[in-house]
Image (cartoon, rainbow, N blue to C red):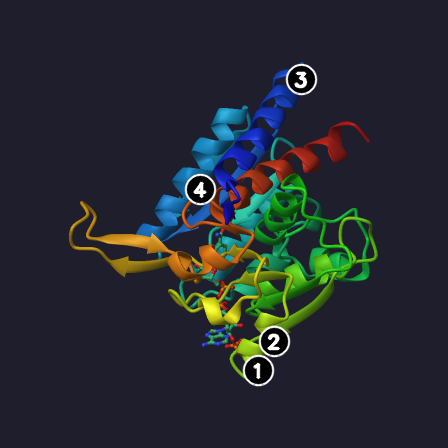
Amino acid sequence: MGRIDGTAIAKEIRTQLAKAVDGLTGRKPGLAVLLVGEDAASETYVANKRRAAHNVGIRSTVIRRPVTIGEEELLQEIDRLNADHEIDGILVQLPLPPHISSSKVIKRIDPAKDVDGFHPINMGKLLIGEEDGFLPCTPYGIHEMLIRSHINPEGKHVVVLGRSNIVGKPLAALLMQKRPTCNATVTLVHSRTKDLKAICREADILVAAIGRPKFVTADMVKGGAVVIDVGINRVDAPQTSKGYKLVGDVDMAQVEEKASLISPVPGGVGPMTVAMLLQNTWTSYCRKEMA
Ligand SMILES: NC(=O)c1ccc[n+]([C@@H]2O[C@H](COP(=O)([O-])OP(=O)(O)OC[C@H]3O[C@@H](n4cnc5c(N)ncnc54)[C@H](OP(=O)(O)O)[C@@H]3O)[C@@H](O)[C@H]2O)c1
């Protein structure tokens, strides 16, 4: 019956970061974003990240390379950023063109600068509960959003819809950790799951990250559950200036009536993801400068 205001929580985090960065006397944290090609959605995401970084005082550099760049040349670009002492965080905007292996590129980033948290070393640390890595920004943002909304997953049954490497799997790994603000019982469901609806109805916290508009309907939600909508789907909306609008994976109109709290799209997980990227960049800076 209530909404989780991801925009407001993200702003709170950015304000705290801005204060911390403002207090620095020496060099400011630096974030490098590598953008290959001219994909419109990627351009928008990069512009948002850049603006957000600038607003908290983090220096950001966007390195643009044409879609024709070779894999080796891109890897060398990453080597250069790995060696640059002014750069605390490196982010490669995905997807990359098909002739470049994303996995190879991600593995080339120095894990200590991997602020997206996608490097296998950071994923491994997350899984085994070592806290000196980086959490992927979307799962990190979801956890932070829950905690700051006074919803502790401890002892709760969390059902995560979707098993991608950037959302579903790392979120499940994070929430199952033996830690006071985690300790959840996690079930992860996907396209081969039997009785998916019935499993979802068992959830105290239901997280939808599948990329299907209005997939989660009221009959999949237990009364009073918390519902987190991660989906970002473009649907036609001829009456709008852009001709489309962004919706989540949850049928908001139906589910809002049944859930105790729900995160909307837009204004939920999206802004949190960007805020946690800045948080990771700050953490990287602090580990280097204040060690
Ligand atoms: N708000 C944010 O900051 C943010 C960040 C990242 C992603 N997103 C959004 O979140 C959504 C998911 O992204 P992603 O990268 O995780 O997606 P993805 O890599 O495409 O993975 C989708 C997952 O959903 C499962 N799935 C798809 N259709 C299903 C169905 N009918 N029933 C059950 N499971 C189904 C897939 O199952 P299989 O594995 O069995 O194929 C897969 O595990 C997208 O809309 C994306 O735009 C938002």
Q: Secondary structure at mark 4?
A: strand
Which mark is on residue 24?
3
Foreground pick, 135 / 173: 173
Residue 170 appears at what percent x and percent y?
A: 65, 61
Is residue 39 something one can see in this rendering? no
Q: Nearer the viewer, mark 3 or mark 4?
A: 3
The reply to whether discs 4 and 1 touch (Cβ–Cβ < 8 Å) is no
Q: Is residue 204 above or below residue 115?
A: below
Q: Is residue 29 above or below residue 75?
A: above
What amino acid type should be assigned to the residue bearing mark 2?
Ile
Q: Secondary structure at mark 1?
A: loop
Determine the image quadrant of residue 193. bottom right
Q: Nearer the viewer, mark 2 or mark 3?
A: 2
Which mark is on residue 199?
2
Provide the residue designation for mark 1.
Answer: 193
The reply to whether discs 2 and 1 touch (Cβ–Cβ < 8 Å) is yes
Q: Residues within 10 Å of mark 3 (few under 14, many from 20)?
A: few
Q: Nearer the viewer, mark 4 or mark 1?
A: 1
Q: Residue at x 37, y 65 (%)?
A: 213
What amino acid type should be assigned to the residue bearing mark 3?
Leu
Residue 85 appears at what percent x and percent y?
A: 65, 33
CA gap, disc 2 and disc 3 = 49 Å
CA gap, disc 3 and disc 4 = 26 Å
Residue 103 appears at what percent x and percent y?
A: 57, 65
What amino acid type should be assigned to the residue bearing mark 1?
Thr
